[in-house]
Amino acid sequence: MGDLFWNKVAGAVLAILLVVMGLREIGDIAFTARAPETLGFPVDPALLEGPAGAEEEVSGPVDFGSLLATASVDAGERVARRCVACHTFEQGGANGTGPNMWGVLGRAVASVSSFNYSSAMRDYGADGTQWLYQNMYEYLEAPRRYVPGTSMAFAGLRSQEDRINLIAYMHSMGSSGLPFPEPLPEEPAIEEEGETPQVAATETAGAPDTATEAGDDMGELAQPAQDLPDAEPADDAAERPEGEE
């Protein structure tokens, strides 16, 4: 091979490089990238507040008596389908990743002898704590927050309706002996104009005294008139002509 061959090879390589560089420049010119005025993506503030129409849960004590009385066991069974990968609910069901849940309400925490509980759950039930409506409600909302260190991987149920329905379903599965709590007493309604009758009654009660005082004043004004001497007849009256009576 002579020098002419290597010159052809070098020329071909240079030609390829020129073509590649030329295509890149043409691409940059044809497809110009424009920098956005504001970095990031627009976010609708309404989406940050949660789903549209979602109702905020009322703070304060949970009225389990009223909520469980109207809860849907069928809806709770549908919610329980999220748990069947780890739990069984029927009587005599085998343990899975989690213990069998038959009769869990009213049962002592970490009391299924055939299941190996986490140390956090054993510590929580060390004093004989039972699964009742309040602690089950809070545990289902956020298991790892309620019992830190639990091996339960489920994130929890954010919906109060789902938690109440699931508890109602658990109640029907071997825990019917645990009665529902009594509904909380209703708070008395606050009347904005509650003081008006008292004010009116006070004003009415004061009215007779005012009338009495007014009467006394009138009596004092009339008293001097009684002490005046009898008026003498006028002279012109004595001089009136007869026949005009």
Image (cartoon, helix red, strand yellow):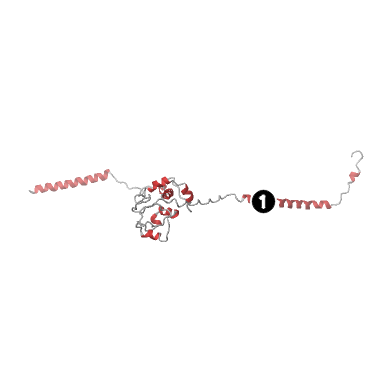
> Quick one: 233 or 108, which is closer to the camera?
108
Q: Which kind of residue does numbered mark 1 sit on?
A: Glu
* Residue at the image point whose x is 12% and y is 47% from the top: 9
> Quick one: 7 or 108, which is closer to the camera?
108
User: Hey, which residue is sitting farthest top in the picture?
Assistant: 243
Residue 72 in percent (x, y) is at 44, 46
Label 1 sits on a secondary structure element that is: helix
Residue 116 in percent (x, y) is at 34, 57
User: Hey, which residue is sitting farthest right in the picture?
Assistant: 242
Residue 70 in percent (x, y) is at 47, 46
- Give the residue at mark 1: 203
* Residue at the image point whose x is 66% and y is 50% from the top: 201
Residue 73 appearing in the image: yes
Crowding near pointer 1: few (<14 within 10 Å), some, many (20+)? few
Quick one: quadrant of the C terminus?
top right
Residue 94 in percent (x, y) is at 34, 52
Residue 59 appearing in the image: no
* Residue at the image point whose x is 89% and y is 44% from the top: 237
Would residue 181 appear left or right of 88 to someone viewing this image? Answer: right
> Quick one: 90 or 11, which is closer to the camera?
90
* Residue at the image point whose x is 83% and y is 51% from the top: 226
Would residue 61 appear left or right of 29 to someone viewing this image? Answer: right
> Quick one: 225 or 95, which is closer to the camera?
95
- Give the mark count: 1
User: Hey, which residue is sitting farthest front in the picture?
Assistant: 92
